[in-house]
Amino acid sequence: MSEDPPAQPTETAPPTDDLVTTNHTIGTGRSRLSYTATTGRVVLREEVVEEGSYLGAEPRAQIFSTAYVLDDADPATRPVTFAFNGGPGSSSVWLHLGLLGPRRVVMGDVGALAPPPYGLTDNLESLLRVSDLVFVDPVTTGYSRGSKGRQAHDYHGYGRDLESVGEFIRLWTSRHDRWRSPKFLAGESYGTTRAAALASHLAERFGLYLNGLMLISSVLDIGSVDFVDGLDSAYALYLPTYTAAAHFHGRIDGELRARIAEAEEFASRELPWALARGHRLHGAERAAVVRRYAELTGLAEDYVDRANLRVELGAFTVELLRDRGLQLGRLDMRFTGWPEDRLAAVAATDPSYAAILGPYAAAINGYLRAELGYVTDTTYNILTDAVQPWSYAEFEGRPVEVATALASAMRANPHLRVHVSCGYYDGSTPHFAAEHVFAHLKVPPAELSRISWAYYEAGHMMYVHEPSRRQQSADLAAFVTGAAP
């Protein structure tokens, strides 16, 4: 009796794109927008060459994206904007459903948050009115993943992240015949780091020149927002944000922008000088600086003195309203919550992130399935630590900064324009630090006219604040139409 031959192992089929296309309309009359949405994962492949021989292109990662293209528009003149958030480790959900996309979260705001399960509504101020949109989730964020058998952590770092996102942009541009279209990048937080670096990478690697960058909550020099022993810059650059927060919570009076201007003056002159003096600052000189610091931040003089004029963000957020049993948010310092430990010296949690996470998670998970038809059991990673530790190997022995890359891109492309959006209550990427970095950008002063600024009375995701969302939508639309030929 013969035996059956042993079963042969089955080969796993190579990954394929799994895109879903749907048609939609928002608005009525003249405000009506008809558009096509395409969402799903695209397989990224890398060319393999060994000993000079080309062996083909192997799948390395699967990038999830959602694209919105206006119906019956001319791709030769219609702009397209590629958008992403930061983290590192964040999906694009915030810009997608908070500001730019045709649908947006209904979550309320400080003091009037909506209850779960939250909702979605048409975003009649969507940037789709003036530009097609492509929201990109980098590897391990959203539904993006490494390909089977490949190490996802290969993409968890500055350089490989640029390569993968840049390759996706090139691939999308080619497949949709959009090389002739005006092209923009919109990044938020670390997404501004990525966007500035991509402007140079795309130009050098593919000859893909951009018309504009929208940098929302900008951080082009990580050192400008890091509190590091022996380096005093962040202690000064954060102070105007402390002033804004103290004003919002009633710790200092006067007109907001006038008080911020006072803080900026102090943070530009007296405070850096005082910090540089170290132990040489004493007596009446020290007392005067301590007093002025306290006046501008709402903190007690004794606390400022004990902190040696160096109050880190985490300490400020728990100290300002300690007497009320409250701590401030980090992403948005308008938000408050009760701390786990009222004696804590620094914050352990962020009440503002807690306030926005639930609404956005509910919105994206429901929206992708119910409205865009993308069905999967994979977890949508809103903001994940799985990308840590994030590699900055390219910057070993030097600061992590991309202002140099931005300057390079601006030199190569005289038509590249930049728009910077700042929230006064942003404790993550303070506006004065962004101004400081751009003030040292290595471009001729005449070229600074290519950079525009906008400020909002809100936080890191300034569009959580409804008046700011409306104004920012108008500002970004004006930038795109003004920067596109």
Image (spheres, rainbow, N blue to C red):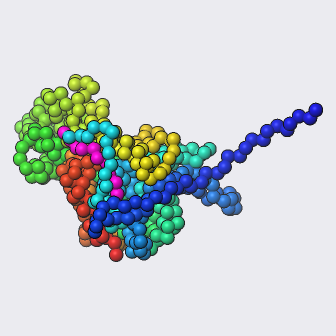
On the image, the x and y values in percent for residue 348 come to 30, 31
Q: In this view, does 30 lie above or below 112?
A: below
Residue drawn at point x = 41 percent, y = 74 percent: 74
* Residue at x-position 51% and y-position 42%: 378
Q: Is residue 148 left or right of residue 160?
A: right
Q: Which residue lies furthest to the right in this view?
A: 1
Which one is in front, 204 or 469?
Answer: 469
Report the side of 179 relative to 354 (left or right): right
Q: How many labels does the image show?
A: 0
From the viewer's perspective, is 109 left or right of 383?
Answer: left
Dominant secondary structure of the magenta stretch? strand
The answer to which quarter of the image holds residue 477 is bottom left
Question: Measuring 21% from the left and 46% from the top, which residue is drawn there?
Answer: 425
Residue 128 sits above or below residue 343 on the image: below
The spot of residue 83 in percent (x, y) is 39, 57
In the image, 273 versus 69, the foreground residue is: 69
Q: Give the range drawn in magenta.
A: 102-111
Q: Is residue 273 visible?
A: no
Q: Is residue 359 above or below residue 73?
A: above
Identify which residue, 160 or 43, lies in the foreground: 43
**Quadrant (top left/top right/bottom left/bottom right) for the C terminus:** bottom left
Q: Can residue 372 be seen in this view?
A: yes
Quadrant of the drawing holding the N terminus: top right
Image position, residue 361 (x, y; %): 38, 42
Q: Does the magenta stretch include residue 361?
A: no
User: Could you say where residue 472 lies in the image, as x and y percent from the top left?
Assistant: 24, 58
x 38%, y 65%: residue = 34
The verdict on residue 108 being magenta is yes
Tell me which corner region of the image, top left, top right, bottom left or bottom right, holds residue 340. top left
Can you tell which quarter of the image residue 196 is in?
bottom left
